Image (cartoon, rainbow, N blue to C red):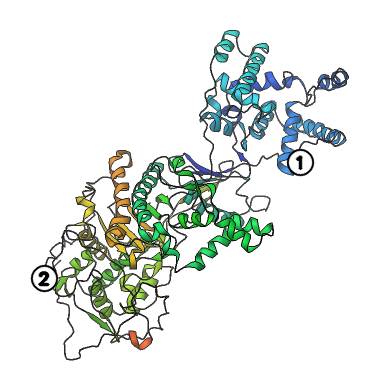
Amino acid sequence: MEELENPRAALASEVIADDGTILGKYYQVDRSSSDYNEISKNVINALIATEETRFYDNSGIDAKGTMAIPFYLLIGKKRGSSTITQQLALNLQTDNLGKQRSTNPIGRGFQKLQEWIIAIKLERNFTKEEILTLYLNTVAFGDNVYGIENGARTFFSKDAGHLSIEEAAILVGMLKGNTMYNPRRNPQLALSRRNTVIDNMVESGFIKPAEATAAKSKPIVLHYNKIDHNKGLAPYFREVLRDELKSWCKNHNKADGTPYNLYRDGLKIYTTINPRMQVYAEEAVAKHLQVLQKFLSAQSDVKTGSVWKKWPQYLDKYTKESERYKAMKEDEASDSVIAKAFNTPVKMKVFAWRSSTEPDLNEIDTTMTPLDSIKYMRAVLQAGFMAMDPESGEVKAWVGGPDFRYFKNDHVAKTRRQVGSTFKPFLYCFAIMNGMSPNTMLPNEPVTIGKWTLSRNSEGSVGGNITMAGALARSLNLVSAYLIKQIGAKAFADFAQNKIGFESEIPPYPSIALGTPEISLYEMLRAYTMFPARGINTKPIYITRIEDRNGNILETFAPVKREVISEKESYTMVKMMEGVLLPGGTGARMRSRYNLQGEMAGKTGTTNDNTDGWFMGYTPKLLAGAWVGCENNFIHFATTGIGQGANTGLPIWAYFMQKVYADKTLKINSTDKFEVPANMSDETYSNFDTNVKPGAEAEDIGNGSAEDFGTGSESDYATPGADKPAAEPAQKPKEENKPATNKPKDDNKPAPKAVYPPKRDE
């Protein structure tokens, strides 16, 4: 009785962007709700004229119509007698109790009796306008679309309040059969039914004959826009958000004490996603992956499939995880039959880059064996990209992969990869905090820690001295190894884990200086906020508030901030990281090739064998990061020229920022300046051309291999004056890696030391 007196239709929860547009919905049935004054009079008039002309004159049951049923049955005709209120009663039973219209005559008779009782109660408790509104919010329009508002948005891309006579007639006409009279599936039948509804409106006096003639002369013009979870803006973000919201619902109860239901309670989730930036981000990722994929697909080991020869266990694993394999196993097919099927060519659709702006075009019909299709899809490059306001923490764009229809794994928050040299700024920052400066001269010489020696930089260079700013700009591994030896791996790991606040494990081993920790892009961006945000670490925020179906605020969300380093230390790091994008730095192409100007800073990163390519960059108002790689580490680019972060992650960032700068509505400009702290000069640390000669652009290659510190026991990593860390866990060596070598230490040769610049007043 309580449910009938307070009927509530299940409503889809809506994800709303920062400009009020709907990004997507979570639903079992796709329904939106409208108030009476938000529905076009054309819809109301068409409904009454077609479904029940005596609606305003009865009390929920049409006695005249009911009494006429036996007569119509005797002459062999069907006649509907259910009033709008009775139809609403059936809709509410279907929605709340899961009851469907009975096909059994006896069962239908009892159901009819229930409808009469409910209809009378509805008439006693609600006005005619409220009943019409409830009815129009519960009716189905096919394609799993419920409610007049959703019907209007789906078929005509407009709200229910602006439907024309002919559009209203189309939707009301569908109520007789939402499949038969669906204008998308059966346009001719829908046109005929539309015109019948328009004639009914004339007969009932709602419109004039001239208006009807004009409306019927128009063709059906659809602007079909069905929200699909696999399509639309930010699908990876919406899926990550779904998991978080399901958890939120479990921990928050409605007034009746039951938890909120994400799929039925019509929640409105207001997010920080900016649709324009999201489009720019998705297009930037697609544009560059489309180019990179050509290089990877043409690579010999990928093209021939030989890359899988050393990894048959993975191929077997993916085969057994496939729907085809599971279906054949359920049918009790033998292993030999399954093996034959997986090696027999069949027709299928697969993902393939065709357009960076039209995702629907990125699939092709082809013929290949199911086994080859697994190899093909695993060799599709993946990417993660996220952009945020470093001060407020608001996430503006989120791209978790190339195409959510085919690749569900989110590479922003749900995956962790080795971060390579993008981790070095934290080491250099810790060095600044411990008395060094950007102009401190550091040795670019072999470094021995315990019994292990790093003998050269990844690209092969060794020797000379360079400023700390220059070493960061050129991403020299030898200098990073020198710094971790001076500072102590345990002290630096503690700074990263407990001060910066990484949730991923940062083990206290020297190799972390070269970026061996596995961290998500989301975590990296959170950590990087301290540089442009003047020393403040801000947790990314993507929900601003959650409202119930009536607009009542259930919870608001505010950013979590912590001061990690001083304003002067953060500004010093900003100026040092600007050097990465200057001539001689690993990211110099940002200005020379992509023509981005203004104040910006960042860091490239590349892991061993070009497995992961990273770029983290920021301007005074925007922080963004990109990762590129394959799901499997053993599928990677063969050359550093193509696979390094400067050529994989950086261009995505550049394409995105080009669009952002060009869009003046975003108010992010190349003229924006990093704020200089009080009592500090605006210095540029670009004087790093010492006796380590940079080229036009330095290469950032790898984050160290087994040779670069290897694995070992506590004593292997002991550093003077530092506590002994626990033993570093052994890593699985890759087949391509050379075995670790033990370099003898020359005790007679003095270790190189840093040369500090003269102190000066700030």
Q: Residue 685: image x %, image y %?
A: 16, 62
Q: Where does label 1 land, which residue?
A: 99
Q: How crowded is mark 1: few (under 14 residues within 10 Å), some or many (20 or more)?
A: few
Which of 634 and 617 lies nearest the eye of the viewer? 634
Residue at point 40%, 59% (across, down):
302
- Residue at x 40% of width, y 80% of height: 728
Element type at mark 2 = loop
Name which quarter of the figure residue 299 lies in: bottom left
| Left or right position of 580 against 330 | left
Q: Are marks 1 and 2 in contact (CB under 8 Å)?
A: no
* Vertical side of 449 occupied by 539: above or below: above
Residue type at mark 1 is Lys
The residue beneath circle 2 is 691
Q: Closer to us: mark 1 or mark 2?
A: 2
Helix, strand, or loop for circle 1?
A: loop
How many labels, in total? 2
Task: Residue 340: give x, y in percent of width and height.
Answer: 58, 58
Could you say where residue 96 lies in the image, as x and y percent from the top left?
72, 43
* Residue 77 at least partly seen: yes
- Answer with mark 1 or mark 2, whichever residue precedes in sequence: 1
Residue 498 seen: no
